[in-house]
Image (tube, grey):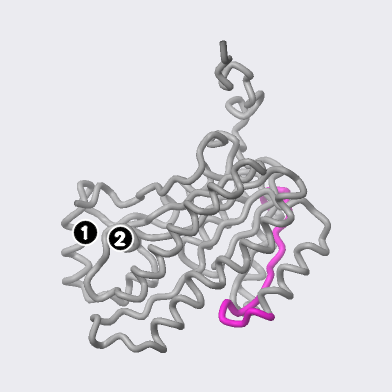
Amino acid sequence: MLVPSACKNTLPNTLESTLILNQKNAVITGCLRGIGRETLALFAEQGANVWACAQAADEEFESFCGELAAKHGGWVKPIYFDLTDHDAIKGAMRSIQMDKKPVDCLVNVAGLTRDALVHMTTMDQLRQVFDVNLFAQVLITQYLTKLMVRQKRGCVINVASISGLDGNAGQLSYSASKAALIGVTKTLSRELGELGIRVNAVAPGVIDTEMNAIVPRDILASRVSRTSLGRLGGPREVAGTIAFLASDLSEYMTGQVIRIDGGMN
């Protein structure tokens, strides 16, 4: 008779610890603001060390990273590169590899939107959005999962969107790129699972970020009215689910897309 793996008690100390990411090393993209910044802060609070990726050097961001490290006792290392520059991405990934530390987790947060109705969407806009939201994410994932394969463990969390699941008028390029990222998530979970690497995604709804700050107020209000909770979500609320997926509390989860949308219908 097969013995359920749960009987092996593979989570000795996790439930007793208040730090669910203690001593894990994570790479997080899009850390300058929004969901990425809150994810960086929460990971540091929960005991993780972080390579904090952002597009360009920023003094305020450098100070923020230093304060997180000093307050929580880990290390936070800013890494700068442009997601549209594949050579820069490769250089950044090599610098992470040169640190000779295990990479336990990759969180692909960085994203771009170029909203337009279908007949107003140009091929240049489509390529630009896909370059950031899909191609860059895949390239980063290829590099870092090679390191995880050697360790025979690790996890990847992709930040998709409910637009990639449901579609959204005026977001052809964004919805398509996020739907493709969901496809990548499910495929990689199949390919990498037997190597000890979990791949999941979160699909945020209407979140209080700079990306939604430019949405006309009447459209934003209409979207919020479709949620059961009747309010915008916070970046910290998305970060909480990401932290769960990065932790050992979710070690039997892979290939999943978790909606964080306040009950949107």
The part of the chain drawn in magenta is 71-87
| Residue shown at the point (77%, 69%) measured from the top left | 94
Q: Quick check: 131 left or right of 101?
A: left
**Helix, strand or loop for disc 2:** loop
Name the residue nearer the viewer: 157 or 195.
195
Residue 241 horizontal/vertical position (percent) = 46, 46
**Helix, strand or loop for disc 1:** helix
Q: Is residue 75 magenta?
A: yes
Residue 230 horizontal/vertical position (percent) = 20, 52
**Rendered image: mark on residue 206:** 2
Mark 1 vs 2, N-terminal side? 2
Give, as a three-letter code, the residue at label 1. Val
Q: Quick check: 169 left or right of 123?
A: left
Residue behind mark 1: 224
| Residue shown at the point (66%, 68%) measured from the top left | 63
| Residue shown at the point (35%, 76%) measured from the top left | 173
Q: In 3D space, how far apart are the residues under numbered discs 1 and 2 (Cα atoms)?
A: 7 Å
Answer yes or no: do the residues labelled 1 and 2 have beta carbons within 8 Å? yes
Residue 122 lies in quadrant: bottom left
Residue 250 horizontal/vertical position (percent) = 53, 36
Q: Residues within 10 Å of mark 2 (few under 14, many from 20)?
A: many
Residue 95 lies in quadrant: bottom right
Give, as a three-letter code, the residue at label 2. Val
Which quarter of the rendering shows the N terminus?
top right
